[in-house]
Image (cartoon, rainbow, N blue to C red):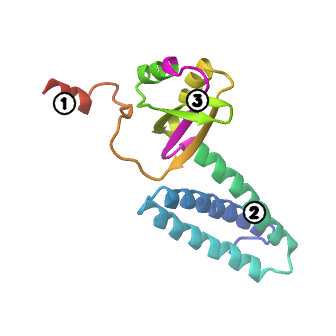
């Protein structure tokens, strides 16, 4: 089937890279509640895995096949994580905590079209301001840059969100560059 047994480990390696990359993405899609995409990826994942493990089991006496399977697993994990970072799917909640007056930080975030909630709280060493915003993961570095400009050593935490509703959030940036009017502009015009 493969022409020569020398190429079989390569096929096993590539198959396992695909399997584990798909598995990582499927797990992320499940966590994000993507009910259609997650099972679809699962179908491809298990189909490819059956091929890879079947070939390894048929060639148990060939350590190259087992090593290729293990190597594919390793690279697949790395690629899955890398791909997930690049896609930056979903939303996150960002808590920024500072002892300083947070007014300038809040103004800067609002000027950048982020919805912000301020909470007065008590920290370990006294009163603090907690500034909270929910954003798309793709926007995280932009928000953290604004926060670092305000206070370079400010404590912050980032939490994945499964879902969020209502509130103020930045409008999705469109590929069409303004050819289609935004929903908020249409509502203001009414």
**Mark 2 vs 3, N-terminal side:** 2
Task: Report the quarter where the N terminus lies.
Answer: bottom right
Taking depth in this image into account, of 56 and 157 the one nearest to the observer is: 157
Asked if the magenta segment contains residue 23, the reply would be: no
Disc 2 from disc 1: Cα separation: 57 Å
Residue 187: numbered disc: 1
Provide residue 5's location: percent of width, then percent of height.
79, 72
Residue at 48% across, 63% down: 38
Residue picked out by circle 2: 10
**Mark 2 vs 1, N-terminal side:** 2
Asked if the magenta segment contains residue 102, the reply would be: yes
Q: Is residue 166 above or below residue 141?
A: below
Left or right for 99, reference 71 = left
Helix, strand or loop under label 2 = helix
Task: Report the quarter where the C terminus lies.
Answer: top left
Disc 2 from disc 3: Cα separation: 57 Å
Residue 128: numbered disc: 3
Provide residue 53's location: percent of width, then percent of height.
70, 76
Helix, strand or loop under label 3 = strand
Q: Which residues are magenta?
A: 86-104
* Marks 2,1: beta carbons within 8 A: no
């Amino acid at each position: 089937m493969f022409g020569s047994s020398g190429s079989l480990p390569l096929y096993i390696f590539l198959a396992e890279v695909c399997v584990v990359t798909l598995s990582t993405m499927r797990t992320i899609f499940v966590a994000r509640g993507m009910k259609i995409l997650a099972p679809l990826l699962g179908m491809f994942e298990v189909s490819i895995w059956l091929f890879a493990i079947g070939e390894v089991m048929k060639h148990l006496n060939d350590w190259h096949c087992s090593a290729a399977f293990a190597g594919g697993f390793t690279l697949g994990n790395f690629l899955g994580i890398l791909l997930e970072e690049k896609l930056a799917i979903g939303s996150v909640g960002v808590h920024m905590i500072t002892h300083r007056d947070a007014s300038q930080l809040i103004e800067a975030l609002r000027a950048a079209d982020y919805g912000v909630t301020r909470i007065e709280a008590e920290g370990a060493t006294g009163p603090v301001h907690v500034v909270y915003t929910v954003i798309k993961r793709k926007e995280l570095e932009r928000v953290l840059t604004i926060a670092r400009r305000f206070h370079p050593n400010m404590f912050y935490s980032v939490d994945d969100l499964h879902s969020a509703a209502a509130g103020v959030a930045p409008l999705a940036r469109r590929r069409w560059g303004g050819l289609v009017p935004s929903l908020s502009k249409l509502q203001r015009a009414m």
